[in-house]
């Protein structure tokens, strides 16, 4: 079994254990405020797809609170990634973003900044800011692609076309900014072939890392209404493992896998309920990968 796990990558790169601290910066999204859409992506809950982000505007205080919460679990020499996870974290003027990001990167034990956003929210001045900050500490940008298929993207109400993603990755890479792409496995209407096509596309996109999510249904989302109406079913665990491993084998061996399951708030989880026990799922996944000798890169066809 081989896959390029984030933890191994971080340990090699920074020489110590590194943990993410979720922060809250920009608290809206063009897919919610009417610029692109008003109802958001169909799976997105009110918290903007960042279930565990700390609340409040003061970044230094958020960092301290987040560090306090993990204090008993992390070694004293741990490093941290300041992670702006919820909503669209570049959807604000540079004059607003600069102090947020600078404050997040300021502590000596913060080793990198990670910013989740949409590819249609990366103007040149925002890219210039990220590029400037990237000279001091690594800056990662996460893009929620989810699928390459236009029909599914319409159902999701993603609100941008594939070429917008391509252009954003091109601009980020031209500035040397590491790029992480999200894919959701198990989207309504997608066949195994379609899922593999998205993984193949990400494999050749130039991205540095990928986050895989199991489609899960959260209370209060429009997806939950469709699920209740019986429009689609969620995946069984074994099916998810098979599809996920098919995707992993399509990636180039160097691409870092940042996540292999979803991470929704358990209290709001409607389906699949098996995904709520993350530790058990990851243990079962590891067994599956060993049994099937899964190897990242085995089905990678190159550029
Ligand atoms: S772009 Fe992100 S924050 Fe905005 S609606 Fe979609 S998932 Fe939610």
Image: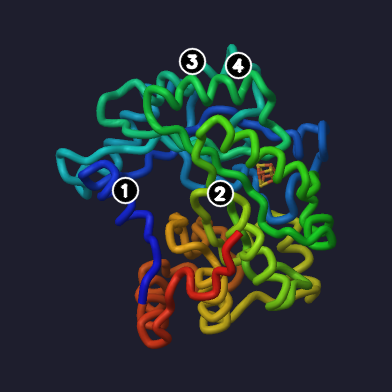
Q: Say if 10 sits above or below 193 in the image.
A: above
Residue at the limit of the structure toward the top, as seen here: 95
Nearer mark to the viewer, of 3 and 2: 2
Q: Position of residue 106 (x, y in %)?
A: 34, 21
Q: Identify the secondary structure beneath mark 4.
A: helix
Q: Mark 4, mark 1: which one is toward the viewer? A: 1
Disc 2 residue crowd, few under 14, some 14–19, many 20+, Cα 10 Å: many
Which residue is located at x 45 percent, y 70 percent? 296
Q: Secondary structure at mark 1?
A: helix
Q: In the drawing, does residue 191 fall left or right of residue 278?
A: right
- Kindly report the distance in space between the C-alpha atoms of the residues bearing marks 3 and 2: 27 Å
Q: Nearer the viewer, residue 84 or 67?
A: 84
Q: Residue 225: give x, y in percent of width and height.
A: 77, 63
Q: Residues within 10 Å of mark 3 (few under 14, many from 20)?
A: few
Q: Secondary structure at mark 3?
A: helix
Residue 195: which quarter of the image? Answer: bottom right
């Amino acid at each position: 079994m081989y896959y390029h796990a984030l933890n191994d990558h971080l340990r090699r790169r920074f020489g110590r254990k590194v943990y993410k601290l979720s922060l809250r910066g920009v608290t809206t999204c063009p897919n919610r405020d009417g610029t692109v859409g008003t109802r958001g992506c169909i799976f997105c809950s009110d918290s903007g797809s960042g279930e565990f982000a700390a609340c409040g505007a003061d970044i230094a205080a958020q960092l301290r609170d987040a560090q306090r919460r993990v204090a008993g679990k992390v070694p004293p020499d741990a490093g941290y990634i300041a992670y702006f996870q919820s909503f669209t974290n570049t959807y604000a003027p540079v004059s607003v973003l600069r102090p947020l990001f600078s404050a997040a990167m300021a502590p000596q034990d913060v080793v990198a900044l990670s910013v989740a956003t949409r590819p249609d929210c990366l103007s040149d001045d925002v890219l210039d800011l990220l590029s400037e900050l990237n000279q001091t500490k690594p800056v990662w940008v996460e893009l929620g692609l989810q699928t390459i298929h236009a029909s599914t993207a319409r159902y999701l109400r993603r609100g941008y076309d594939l070429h917008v993603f391509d252009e954003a990755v091109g601009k980020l890479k031209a500035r040397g900014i590491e790029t992480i792409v999200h894919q959701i496995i198990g989207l309504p209407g997608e066949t195994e072939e379609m899922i593999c096509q998205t993984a193949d596309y990400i494999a050749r996109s130039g991205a540095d890392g990928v986050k895989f999510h199991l489609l899960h249904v959260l209370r209060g989302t429009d997806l939950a209404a469709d699920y209740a109406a019986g429009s689609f079913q969620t995946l069984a665990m074994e099916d998810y493992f098979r599809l996920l491993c098919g995707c992993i084998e399509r990636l180039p061996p160097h691409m870092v896998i940042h996540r292999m399951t979803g991470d929704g708030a358990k209290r709001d989880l409607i389906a699949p309920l098996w995904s709520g026990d993350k530790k058990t799922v990851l243990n079962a996944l590891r067994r599956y990968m060993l049994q099937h000798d899964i190897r990242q890169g085995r089905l990678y066809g190159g550029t």
